[in-house]
Structure formats: structure tokens, C-alpha cells
Image (cartoon, grey):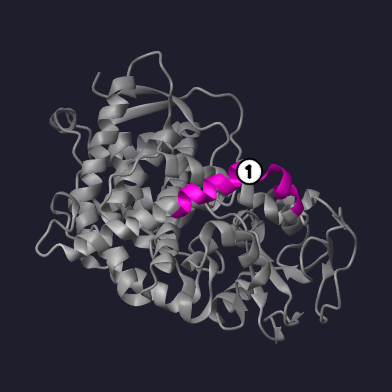
């Protein structure tokens, strides 16, 4: 580990201490586990980075330091190292920009994630998408055929976000989604390989084609919205969904440039459908591995478990909007505990725009990078206790009510000015999906060993989540 990190750094960084592999860093290949081991050894210490594939910088683990980074957006921005590697995929979308361009896209997103959109989500679009999911699961229930839940959740969120934000019928197995998944995996490798430009001259043909498919799809979304706008009193939305085109329309009003709007729309699409689907997949993985927690949700949901309640459950698979506070708070605790152990964005970085000093006294020169590993921080015994590796939803409850942690302690949804706009939407989707599916079905594992994630920009599950399903009413 010494070849990657120096000891705690309190003086200004002069360069990159130590040495590393000049081609593909073994640290970044297994960044989450390596950083976790370092945090366990050094606690909240700030460590100097010794990786030739990265600019000089530090990796932080102290929640106070991370809160400082979040609260000083003008000091810590994406930077060239980050932007250059993601440019092909995210362009000038909100994920990959700073400054005025970021603020305009943020404002458009804030306008979209309003009360009307949340109402449409809970009263119309989520029930519709979840009903389709239930029908699909019913086909596999009480059979010998296994089903990949990750595929199911990707289809659910793709349909949901497609209709809610873009007024379009989207599916997880379409050309765009396949291309985006491939491009994300390939572009993630750029953070491990300093010679990625040269490598992609030889091996990047499929990546180039995938990016072309993605860009064309974004342009088509914008063109369709513009066409609907030009049709006076025309059906601007899909089957009466009054929020369906609002995101792109708001982006058009805010940004104007159609290519930029396409970039931004694709950024929001990816952030919405992929991360929520992955979070649901890991949540159900943990519920399968801890059946007692799934049973607790079920019994909370059906109340005392009376025959009349159970019969009512079997007569309808519709979403129940009137979950008890106790049920809602416990499901939120389960979801957040899953996000803690399996964060959709396990690693992030910012670049210092000026010389600055972190709260612990570490001097950060202009141009250096500040990295944090959410995966590792979420497993810190100093923050989460000696059982930090244990799935224990109760850690999120106080007096039976769900209690948030600070963004520095739990940076899954970022923090400061970049706090995730879709946080509330993700919570609502998760609560209803978890409540509905645990009420209707029992999920059992059809895989061996522990699940891991491949190299990717987010946290998909290697090999999917193969399960067998039992209908609780059978």
C-alpha cells in the first residue's frame, strides 16, 4: 500500500510521492477494496496519492473534509482530468461541467423535479410501471425458471424515466441502452489507463459506434420535443402525461443549443434510470441474503397479518399509497443501508481551482485532485461503528423514525450545491418497489457466492441477480 499512498499529509503537496505502475494502476483496478483497507489502517487521515496516472493530490476520508469540499463548489470542480475522460459519453451535460453551464442545467433540473412531477410519479407513472413489473414476475413465480432481477429493475426504471421525463417509450434492451452500457464500461477504463487514447486507436471501434448511437438518440429526443412544440394544441405528451416533455422543454428554454440540450438530457437519463436500478438490485440482493429483514417488511406492511388483510393483499397487486409511517421509515432504512454498502457511484474526485487548506490542515495546491471513495467511507468503523461491514438497517432509525446522516458521513447523494436532484424521487421509487414486491413475492437466490461489480462508471452487478420467485398467495 505504501507504493500508492504517503502518510498523513499536512504540508503542501510538492509532487506525487512513491511510485506505481506506469500503465494500468493495480490500485485503481481494485480501488474500492484498496481504499477500504487504507481507511481501516489510517482512519480519517488524509493520504497523499502516489499514482503516476493521476495529477498530484490526496484522498480524503474525514467527513469534515468532505463537507468542506461540498460546501465550496467554486474551489473544487470537475477539472480537466475528469472532463477529458468523460467527454465522449457525457459531452457538456451536467455530469461533466462546472460554472455557468452547470448552473443553467441545474436550474432546469430543479424546475422539472417539482411537485407536479412527483405527483405524476406516485399517482400515475410508478403504478403503471410497477404493475408491468409485477405481471412479469408473476410469469416466473412458483416455477423452476430463474429470473435476473437486475434486468427487471433496469426495465422498470427505463420505462419510468422515459415516460416521466421524455414522453418516450424506452426499454432496457433497446439499442441506446445497450450502447450506453458498453460505452460506460469502456470509458471507466480510461481512469485506469494513462495510454487510453493510444489503446482506443486499436480497440475503440465498438466504443466509437456506441457513442454514435448514444448521440443520435439524444438528438432524436430533442427533435421530437421540438416537433411537438410546433404542433399547436397537439399531443405534447404521451397518453396525457402532463410532465413528460417538461425536462427537455425546460432545457431548451434554458440552454437553447440543441446539441447541448441533447447532452444534458442524456446525462439526466443515465443518472435517473441506471443508478436507481442498480440500487434496487443491490437492495434485493441484501434482502435475499437477509430473509429476516424481508419478512419484517412484509409483516409491517400487512399489519397484524390477519386473514382479511392477507386476502386483501392477494386480491390486488396495486401500489398502496397509505403505508404506515413505521413501514415507510423501516423501508427507507433498508434502502439507505443498501446504498451505504453498495453506493451507485463508489468513487469521485474534484480538482482544486486555487490553493486552499482543508479543515484538518492539509494544504491543497491549485490543480491537484481531491479524491474520496464513498464505498470505503461507508465502511469506516470510525464513522459507522465496529459493525460497519454488517447489513443492519436499524442503524438508520432513532425512536423508530428514519434519521439522515450528514453528506460528509454519507456522500451517496453528493452534497452542497451538487446535492442530487433526484434524491426524493429515488426514495419514493424505492419505498414503493420494495413494499410492493416484498408483499407479493418471496425471492430466493439462484447464484453462488457473494456478488461483485465489474469495472464501470457506476455499480452494476457482475452477472446480474439470478433469483427464483415464490408467490406469497400461491
| Residue 168 higher or lower than 143, as above or below | below
In which image quadrant can residue 305 be found?
A: top left
Write the residue at 61% across / 75% down: 64
Write the residue at 34% across / 61% down: 424
State the residue lying farthest toward the top: 144
Mark 1 is surrounded, within 10 Å at the Cα level, by few (under 14), some (14 to 19) or many (20 or more) other residues, namely: few
The answer to whether residue 383 is left or right of residue 118 is right
Give residue 342's position: percent from left, percent from top.
55, 48
- Residue nearest the viewer, comparing 212 with 427: 212
Give residue 245's position: percent from left, percent from top.
25, 60
SS category of the residue bearing label 1: helix
The quarter of the image holding the C terminus is: top left
The answer to whether residue 310 is left or right of residue 299 is left
Please indicate, yes or no, whether residue 466 appears anywhere in the rendered image.
yes
Q: Is residue 46 magenta?
A: no
Write the residue at 79% across / 50% down: 24
- Residue nearest the viewer, comparing 299 with 3: 3
Give residue 119's position: percent from left, percent from top.
20, 59
**Secondary structure, magenta segment, majority class:** helix
Give residue 389's position: percent from left, percent from top.
61, 47
- Please state the extent of the stretch shown in magenta in the rendering: 198-215
Q: Is residue 207 magenta?
A: yes
> What residue is pinned by disc 1?
205
The answer to whether residue 4 is left or right of residue 398 is right
The quarter of the image holding the N terminus is: bottom right
| Residue 417 higher or lower than 310, as above or below | below
Amino acid at each position: 500500500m505504501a507504493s500508492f499512498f504517503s502518510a498523513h499529509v499536512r504540508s503542501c503537496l510538492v509532487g506525487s510521492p512513491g511510485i506505481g505502475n506506469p500503465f494500468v494502476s493495480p490500485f485503481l483496478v481494485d480501488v474500492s477494496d484498496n481504499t477500504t483497507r487504507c481507511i481501516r489502517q489510517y482512519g480519517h487521515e488524509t493520504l497523499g496519492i502516489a499514482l503516476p496516472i493521476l495529477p498530484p493530490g490526496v484522498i480524503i476520508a474525514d467527513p469534515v473534509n468532505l463537507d468542506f469540499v461540498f460546501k465550496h463548489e467554486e474551489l473544487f470542480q470537475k477539472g480537466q482530468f475528469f472532463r477529458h475522460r468523460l467527454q465522449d459519453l457525457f459531452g457538456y451535460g451536467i455530469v461533466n461541467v462546472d460554472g455557468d453551464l452547470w448552473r443553467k442545467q441545474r436550474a432546469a433540473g430543479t424546475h422539472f423535479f417539482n411537485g407536479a412531477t412527483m405527483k405524476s410519479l406516485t399517482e400515475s407513472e410508478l403504478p403503471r410501471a410497477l404493475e408491468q413489473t409485477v405481471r412479469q414476475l408473476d410469469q416466473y413465480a412458483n416455477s423452476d425458471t430463474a429470473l435476473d432481477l437486475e434486468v427487471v429493475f433496469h426495465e422498470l426504471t427505463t420505462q419510468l424515466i422515459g415516460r416521466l421525463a421524455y414522453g418516450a417509450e424506452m426499454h432496457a434492451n433497446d439499442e441506446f441502452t445497450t450502447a450506453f452500457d458498453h460505452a460506460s464500461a469502456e470509458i471507466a477504463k480510461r481512469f485506469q489507463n494513462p495510454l487510453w487514447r493510444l489503446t482506443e486507436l486499436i480497440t475503440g471501434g465498438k466504443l466509437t459506434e456506441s457513442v454514435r448511437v448514444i448521440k443520435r438518440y439524444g438528438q432524436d429526443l430533442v427533435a421530437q420535443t421540438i416537433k411537438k412544440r410546433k404542433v399547436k394544441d397537439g399531443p405534447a405528451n404521451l397518453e396525457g402525461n402532463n410532465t413528460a416533455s417538461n425536462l427537455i422543454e425546460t432545457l431548451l428554454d434554458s440552454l437553447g443549443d440543441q446539441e447541448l440540450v441533447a447532452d444534458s438530457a442524456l446525462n439526466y437519463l443515465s443518472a435517473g434510470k441506471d443508478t436507481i436500478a442498480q440500487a434496487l438490485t443491490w437492495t434485493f440482493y441484501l434482502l435475499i441474503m437477509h430473509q429476516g429483514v424481508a419478512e419484517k417488511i412484509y409483516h409491517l406492511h400487512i399489519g397484524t397479518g390477519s386473514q382479511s388483510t392477507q386476502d386483501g393483499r392477494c386480491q390486488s397487486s396495486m401500489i398502496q399509497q397509505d403505508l404506515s409511517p413505521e413501514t415507510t421509515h423501516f423501508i427507507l432504512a433498508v434502502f439507505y443501508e443498501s446504498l451505504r454498502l453498495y453506493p451507485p457511484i463508489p468513487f469521485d474526485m474534484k480538482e482544486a481551482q486555487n490553493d486552499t487548506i482543508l479543515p484538518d490542515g492539509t494544504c491543497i495546491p491549485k490543480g491537484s485532485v481531491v479524491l474520496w471513495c464513498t464505498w470505503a467511507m461507508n465502511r469506516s468503523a470510525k464513522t459507522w461503528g465496529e459493525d460497519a461491514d454488517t447489513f443492519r438497517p436499524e442503524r438508520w432509525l432513532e425512536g423508530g423514525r428514519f434519521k439522515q446522516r450528514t453528506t460528509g458521513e454519507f456522500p451517496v447523494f453528493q452534497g452542497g450545491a451538487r446535492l442530487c436532484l433526484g434524491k426524493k424521487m429515488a426514495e419514493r421509487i424505492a419505498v414503493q418497489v420494495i413494499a410492493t414486491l416484498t408483499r407479493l413475492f418471496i425471492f430466493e437466490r439462484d447464484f453462488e457466492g457473494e456478488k461483485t461489480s465489474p469495472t464501470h462508471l457506476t455499480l452494476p452487478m457482475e452477472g446480474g441477480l439470478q433469483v427464483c420467485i415464490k408467490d406469497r398467495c400461491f
